[in-house]
Image (spheres, rainbow, N blue to C red):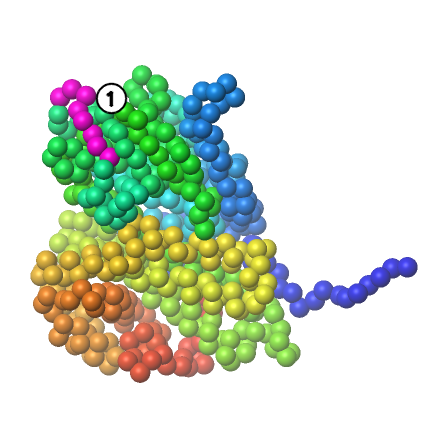
Amino acid sequence: MAWTTHHVFNQPQPLNSSNLFTRDIALCEAITREGAGWDREWLASVGLQLGSAESLELGRLANAQPPELLRYDARGNRIDEVRFHPAWHLLMQGVCASRLHNLSWQPDVPSNGMVARAARFILHAQVEAGSLCPVTMTHAAIPLLQNHLPVPYADWRETLLSDRYDAHHLPGDQKRGLLIGMGMTEKQGGSDVLSNTTRAEPVGARGPGEAYRIIGHKWFFSVPQSDAHIILAQTSQGLSCFFLPRLLPDGTRNAVRLERLKDKLGNRANASAEAEFQDAIGWLMGEEGEGVRLILKMGGMTRFDCALGSHGVMRRALSIALHHAQQRQVMGKNLSDQPLMRAVLAQQALQLEGQTALLMRLARAWSAPASEHERLYARLLTPAAKFGICKAGMPFVAEAMEVLGGVGYCEESDLARLYREMPVNSIWEGSGNVMCLDVLRVLNRQPEVLAMLHDEFEAVKGCNRHFDRRWRQLRLQSGQVREGVARELTQELLQLASAAILLTVAEPPLADGWCAQQLDDRGHRALSDDLCTRLLLRASAA
């Protein structure tokens, strides 16, 4: 006897065949507006590939099968290697082919290469964010390495600019591509790197480019399989920066011992290790005592990538929620046609409109370091963006889960993995408080930043009353700002900067809607039905 208990219906199809770039109208517009329209063809091509079921499955597999630490081989030899699922290597081939690790430094890239790279970064983040960690650190390290590579590794300069991914455990001069990791934090200090106890003593002569013997540990040794790491260690002159290769010039393993891999909440496809240095050899970069100054040059870029990655994950969460709502029926109507659900989805879409505009404008600032105005813009708003956008990611993905209901809370949905992924970017490269203190430091120590803000914000003064009021309130706070209000001030700066861009480039209803949502002291205002329709169309364009 055949038993039929029920028929499955009203279950939306998964979102596994879409173009991640062309569906994002805000990103498409920003690419052209910020001077990287030359990359549209590449972005459309890679967007189609990344939105395929095959690419999305790679992201799922790499997280379902996290890396494994192999401390010894079968004969008892110490090897300290990390074994990954094949899906990880395919993902890494993709991010390297997109040159996320070096596009900005290519000599033949047209203007505003940072803008094109930022867009590519956002697309890849929607598939698997952990694979972005190796390319983020490599991208930030390359400018430093171009000036400070030790003589035995001078031939790495060309290979660092390759678009190839090479996971083989070989000397750098035998590889087709190279990746660089970082090792900054220790057990006792975390973000307080001045408390680091790892020490370095010269093997022979002291000074830049010379070899030092390093003893100590790192509590977070990011991407331990990298070809080299940039680390901090104490010398007689203070905290200093070192190039620590995986293999020494003679091909032998450096004395870097991997103690264990971190068992993390999310970001599980990516390996993070605890390491000890047992007379490891590193080469001094810059002068002794210059470690913090050199690392800060890299820190801004990695913090910008944190904001980009969080934005990409948020964009994927909204796409899934909107795709579901457009198919799921309740009381005879699609969820996306229900007034309250439409309002929730439209508010999320509006939030991403502001983030997209701000991040692409910030990428343009990073592309023009020779301009003092752009340098100050990037210096102030990068930590602000990392704070505000990364913080917003967790409740944003949780809201997307609610759109799907119980299905969204289950592991079969991508949203569970996306939710676990969100906190890492708020923590890595400096937590929220560290970012806000950095913003405060810039405002209190660089008075020329206020002139930069004046130029940015006065240009749109009179376009929106909410913006005008908040900008007037911010000007009254000029001077030495108290630490206790740093979070509120940082969020205010981010909101005003986003509003200024939207008031300049967006349609008035969209810009005014954003200002009402984010800048009205009376709280969020309801969006008009026409604006909801416009936002949902822009967020789900075919």
- Residue at the image position 24 percent from the left and 81 percent from the top: 465
Q: Which residues are magenta?
A: 198-205
Please name whichever residue, 323 or 113, is drawn nearer the observer in this view of the structure: 323
Residue 209, above or below 357: above
Toward the front, the furthest residue is 188
Residue that mark 1 sits on: 152
Residue 88 in the magenta stretch? The answer is no
The image shows residue 386 at horizontal and vertical percentages of 30, 57
The amino acid type found where label 1 is placed reads: Pro
Q: Residue 518, how many percent across, how many down?
A: 32, 74
Residue at 43% x, 39% y is 261
Q: Position of residue 371 (x, y in %)?
A: 15, 52
| Label 1 crowd bin: few (<14), some (14–19), many (20+), radius 10 Å | few
Between 504 and 145, the one lying in front of the other is 145
309 vs 286, nearest the viewer? 286
Count of marks placed on residues: 1
| Quadrant housing the N terminus | bottom right
Horizontal side of residue 203 vs 103, given as left or right: left
Residue plotted at (52% across, 57% down): 416
Q: Residue furthest right?
A: 1
User: Where does the image place residue 84, in percent across and percent down from the top left?
Assistant: 49, 36
Position of 158 with respect to 528 (left or right) is left
Tell me if residue 273 comes above or below residue 250 in the rendering: below
Q: Quadrant of residue 167?
A: top left
| Above or below for 165 versus 453 | above
